[in-house]
Each structure stands twice: as structure tokens, then as C-alpha cells.
Image: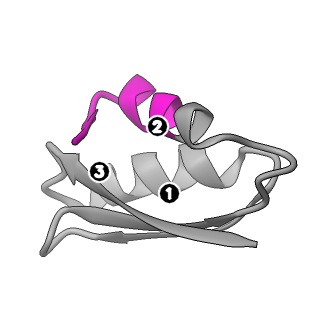
Amino acid sequence: MESVTMKVDGMSCNHCVNAVEGSVSKLQGVSLVKVNLENGSVEINYEQAHITLEQIKEAIEDQGYDVV
């Protein structure tokens, strides 16, 4: 199990939290998604054998946010 914290720009409300957590949590291999609006970050636990960081990044960006 890998753990990563990504900095994400553009999140400002509970809708943003739900959009990011909802889309990333549906990905195969992801076991935890926790958005912190205060510091603009997303903590993710995932299995490298099932998913890449690039796929996770794409899922966040597909919701309209920028991973920096």
C-alpha cells in the first residue's frame, strides 16, 4: 500500500470535496481519499499494482481541478 499527498488547486467547498473524493475513490486500487480544503491537498492510499499516480491525477483533473 502506497500513500501520497497531492496539492490540488481550485477546491473551495464541500461540492469540490465530494467531486474529488467520489471520482478518485471509484478507481480500482484506491483505498482512501481524504481532501483537506484548508491546505488544498488530497491524501490517497492506493495499490501500485492496480493504479498509477498519473491515473489518479487524471481523475482529479477530469473534475476540473489542477494537480500541482
Task: Assign a secondary structure to mark 3.
Answer: helix
Name the residue tied to disc 3: 16
Look at 49% across and 28% down and name the residue there. Answer: 58
Point out the frontmost of discs 3 and 2: 2
- Counting residues from the N terminus, which is met first, the one under dot 3 or under dot 2? 3
- Distance from disc 3 to disc 1, alpha carbons, whole Å, reads 8 Å
Task: Assign a secondary structure to mark 1.
Answer: helix
Q: Are marks 1 and 2 in contact (CB under 8 Å)?
A: no
Q: Is residue 7 left or right of residue 55?
A: left
Q: Amino acid at mark 3?
A: Cys
Q: Amino acid at mark 2?
A: Lys
Q: Quadrant of residue 63?
A: top left
Name the residue tied to disc 1: 21
Question: Dot 1 surroundings within 10 Å: few (below 14), some, or many (20 or more)?
Answer: many
Task: Assign a secondary structure to mark 2.
Answer: helix
- Counting residues from the N terminus, which is met first, the one under dot 3 or under dot 1? 3
Residue 28 vertical position relative to residue 36 in the rendered view, above or below: above
Where is the C terminus found, in terms of image quarters? top left
- Distance from disc 1 to disc 2, alpha carbons, whole Å, reads 12 Å
Which residues, given as a range, are shown in magenta?
Answer: 57-68
Name the residue tied to disc 2: 57
Report x, y in % for residue 66. Answer: 24, 34
Residue 15 vertical position relative to residue 59 in the rendered view, above or below: below
- Distance from disc 3 to disc 2, alpha carbons, whole Å, reads 15 Å
- Counting residues from the N terminus, which is met first, the one under dot 1 or under dot 2? 1
Look at 24% across and 49% down and name the residue there. Answer: 8
> Is 64 covered by the magenta stretch?
yes
